[in-house]
Amino acid sequence: MDVFGDVVFLARLQFTLTVAFHFVFVPLSIGLGLITAIAETRHFRSGKPEDGAAARFWLKIFTTTFAIGVASGITMEFSFGTNWADYSRFVGDIFGAPLAAEALFAFFLESVFLGVLLFGRDKVSPRFYCVSSWLVWGGSCLSALWILIANSWMQTPAGAELVADGSKAVLTDFLGAAFNPTTGLRYFHVITAALVMGGLVAVAVAAYHHIKEKNVDFAQKTLKTGLVVLIVGTCALFVSAHSTAVGVWQEQPTKLAAMEGQYADEVPPLYFFGYVDEQNQTVIGPSLPGFTSFLATFTFDTVYPGLNSLSETDKYGDMNPAEMPVNAIFQMYHLMVAISGVLALLIVLILIGLATKKFSNWKWLQKLLVIAPIFPLIAIEAGWFTAELGRQPWVVYPSTSGPDGVALLTEAAASKSVTAPELLLIIVLFFAVYLLLFVAWIRLTGKYVKEGPEFLSDESGGDEGGMPTFISRLTGEAKPEAVAADAAEASGASKTALDGAAGQKGGE
């Protein structure tokens, strides 16, 4: 097939696989970081052994997820210097700053205080330990901010200008570039989605233990915590979704047109679902007339420009509507919206079950909740595909308010020195390694969830509450208390043998 010889397609495929895998763990890390901080705060206030066990449980889940996220994120950034070297030359003056800031100000903050959580439970005060858990979560949120600053600049460039020879963009206003027209909107949307993810994971863990009818106190507290985070996150998510749609309407008209399969200028309807017939430039499916107009402008009669007329303008003249992946963008966008409705329905069902005191008996709902985290995960991935496919054929999009000339076609961004066989080899190797990492993560987290919170014989402190126990579990080493018990047993056996030998000698 020709696609296997297309360097640009293969470079995009490799980066898509890498980012899609990495983006599984980003919202999970942010969401689980909040759940972990809440659990540590509850333990700090109550001092109860069961709350300490719950805090350690969530720390194990978070640490495992964080480790995979870091590993996959590093390989993603290396792609900028290999497959996308020409892109890096064009935006290096702007793109390098937020990536460096993410490492210096966010990743270090997150890593240092995660070290406190893992190794310092008995070495720092309980108050400082609790604060460290919140600093870890804050570091993960700050890390997401810097990455989204870089990505948002690619969507809506600002604070930069094109050099005279047109070879690259240079930074003219750091704050203008950092807080470009969509940074705040996109960041708010990603963080609220991560809160929904974290809250629903907590609810899923609680539902699992309800099904198994064990760790009842842990399950009840976790369900309440997860439900509160889920409700707050979902309500904020709907607000952020509207704000993001308005931003797309104002800054990226070709993306909005593709999201609704709109080729001609019209008042666009809101489709529940459907199929875009790209050849005939029509959409087949049920819709609400004028509702897309209402979502962006609060009026039902705003005429939106279609892909055909936009392609005839100077700014978007490089776009060919016939080559745009309109149906793929349409499907991803509507899948994301549909799952938002599923999440709202799940919340209603949980609230009804709790209000009527039937939640414990509704095994069907509990089983549904165990697999429910897959819904926001699919929605998050679909949203990312919508954002990235929707800006094609540009990798740096010529937004409405963007500086003149600061745009870059995807075909011009891929490295000319990388060959198709090399990219195919990288894709195969990455797929194999990432599959191995994913299976390892699933097995570890599944094991922790099945075991539930572990109570220690001494809840007052000691290395048992920190990383040493976690390391021993991963490496298969014996726990300190197990070693002590074995030693005591051996000592007792030796003493019994000596006494028996002495008695036998005396009898002789």
Image: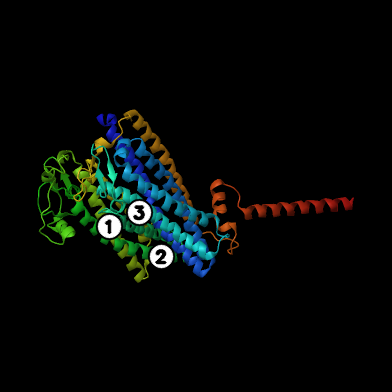
Determine the residue located farthest toward the right in the rendered image.
508
Residue 476 rendering spot, x and y as whole percentages: 57, 47
Residue 492 appears left or right of 355: right
Residue 84 appears left or right of 403: right
Under mark 3, the amino acid is Leu
Q: How is the image coloured?
A: rainbow
Residue 217 sits above or below residue 30 on the image: below
Q: Which residue is mark 2?
A: 225
Q: Which residue is mark 1?
A: 340
Under mark 2, the amino acid is Thr
Task: Place residue 434 in its image quadrant.
Answer: top left
Say few, some or many: other residues with alpha carbon within 10 Å of mark 1 (under 14 / 14 to 19 / 20 or more).
Answer: some
**Mark seen at residue 13:** none
Q: CA distance from mark 3 to mark 2?
A: 25 Å
Q: CA distance from mark 2 to mark 1?
A: 20 Å
Residue 51 rendering spot, x and y as whole percentages: 50, 65
Residue 31 sits above or below residue 427 on the image: below
Residue 316 rendering spot, x and y as whole percentages: 16, 43
> Which of pointers 2 and 1 lies earlier in the amino acid sequence?
2
Q: Which one is nearer the viewer's eye here, 27 or 87?
A: 87
**Mark seen at residue 145:** 3
Residue 197 rendering spot, x and y as whole percentages: 36, 56
Question: Do the residues under discs 1 and 3 have CB atoms within 8 angstroms?
Answer: no
The number of discs equals 3
Secondary structure beneath disc 2?
A: helix
> Which of pointers 1 and 3 lies earlier in the amino acid sequence?
3
Q: CA distance from mark 1 to mark 3?
A: 23 Å
